[in-house]
Image: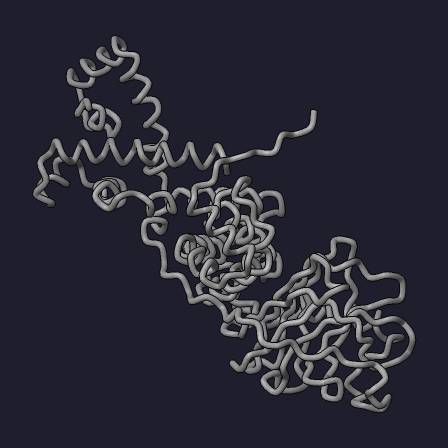
Amino acid sequence: MNERLSDYLLGELEGTDRERFEAELARDPALAAEAERLRPVVTRLESLDRSAWELPEAPALPPITPREPAAAPERERRPAWWRRALVVRPLAAATLAVVLLALGVGAGLLLGGDGGDDGPAGGRVVALDPVEPLGGEASGTATISAKDGRATVNVRGLPPSAKGDFYELWLLNTPDDLVSLGSFRVPASGDVDVTVPLPANPDAFAALDVSVEPPDGNPAHSSRSVLRAPLAPA
Amino acid sequence: MAAVPAVRSPSPAERRLADGLGRRDEAALGDLHALCGRTVMGFLVRTLGNRATAEDVFQQVFLEAWQRGPTYDPGRASPLTWIMAIARSRAIDQLRKRVPEPRDPAGSLALLEGEGRGDAVVDELIERWRFAHLLGQLPEQEADVLRRRFYAGATQTEIADSTGMPLGTVKMRMVQGLGRLRDMLDAEERGA
């Protein structure tokens, strides 16, 4: 190895030493090629953000061990009057979807007033996995902040809402024990981010569920789940 | 003419990682976390300008990696490239939801200047952190002389004085480190 190569690349050769080395480069194509090969690396190192030299510790992985999923609710088994007040009526779904989307944006605007966190920092993040056969390639995450009383749901790859249909979010234990969190529609992109208030303690439920609901006026769960996340205790 | 998809030759370790992710093996996610976690977190903290938010997004990134594991193809992308693509998307999602009063003018402010420009800034940050990740793969002796030179600003003579290494050894490790970095960059760029 030519020791002066590092001197040259690092700008530590001056005056006649530098001229001599450049003459050597002109005579030695292999040495010149090596200098040209390494020069961009030096440039990148010189412009490297200082924080890149001190990578932070990585946070622990989120809990991923899936629990036994809650059974899909059976539409017929739930009385029609069940928690009706918490269930979004399909006729109001379009309006509520707008409200929820506004909440999603508004929550960021209102709660992130210091320009810092607009998500529920410190909230529990859970993975929404597709439920066969309707879930397909869909996926998502939900950040649940019981302290703030809200959940932010980010879903991707859902089929765009068909005319009149809407998606509904649920906290779910059993077919007889579930709470609607609200509904939303999915645009052509298949991606949507929604923030919803939590009317009940999520720790008291086994799963967060997303179902597709028809505009049939029935407030019960349609039994057509597309995504679900087990809710392990925080 | 149709674009030809890049094909790379994954290392045995990358194949094992991909197999594990494909089987939804929790240990494989742990390996991915060990390999890329600090780089992903460094990128997110720098891009989002807030550690708590970065931690939330970090968890989303690894959950998404877990969910998408069966689709990861090491013949198309290195694990770092793959997970940084996920991190890039989630970081951009987060920034687009944000109030326009970022704390870090070099990071999130620039990202809010315009969608196209914001994406370009994120891509630039991704490149920097990919490079930082490669630095972390160097043998410690080579990484040490590079850190002393490019982070601490010491000359080779000063490095020799402070470490007690012969000056010739410092120079040799400097060139070896630069050469190894170049090889890793070429390998990444060939099959990124």
Say above or below: A82 vs B57. below
Q: How many marks?
A: 0
Frontmost residue, A188 versus A207: A207
Which quarter of the picture shows residue A144?
A: bottom right
Tell me the quadrant of the picture where the N terminus of chain B can be found: top right
> Which quarter of the picture shows residue A168?
bottom right
Q: Nearer the viewer, residue A96 or B60?
A: B60
* Along the line of sight, the residue nearer the viewer: B98 or B137: B137
Residue depicted at x 35% and y 32%:
A41
> How far across and how far down the image is residue A162, in percent?
86, 61
- How far across and how far down the image is residue B188, in percent? 45, 37
Q: Residue at x 46, y 67 (%)?
A: B52
- Residue placed furthest toward the right: A216
| Residue A77 shown left or right of residue B107 in the figure | right
Give coordinates of residue B26: x percent, y percent: 48, 63
As displayed, is residue A11 above or below residue A208? Answer: above
Residue at 47% x, 40% y: name it.
B10
Identified at 20% across, 35% down, the residue is: B173
B162 shown above or below B8? below
Q: What color scheme is it? A: one colour
Q: Is residue A63 above or below residue A158?
A: below
Residue A220 screen position, x and y as percent:
83, 82
Q: Nearer the viewer, residue B104 or A7?
A: A7
Residue found at the very far top of the displayed protein = A27
Q: Left or right: A6 with respect to A139?
A: left
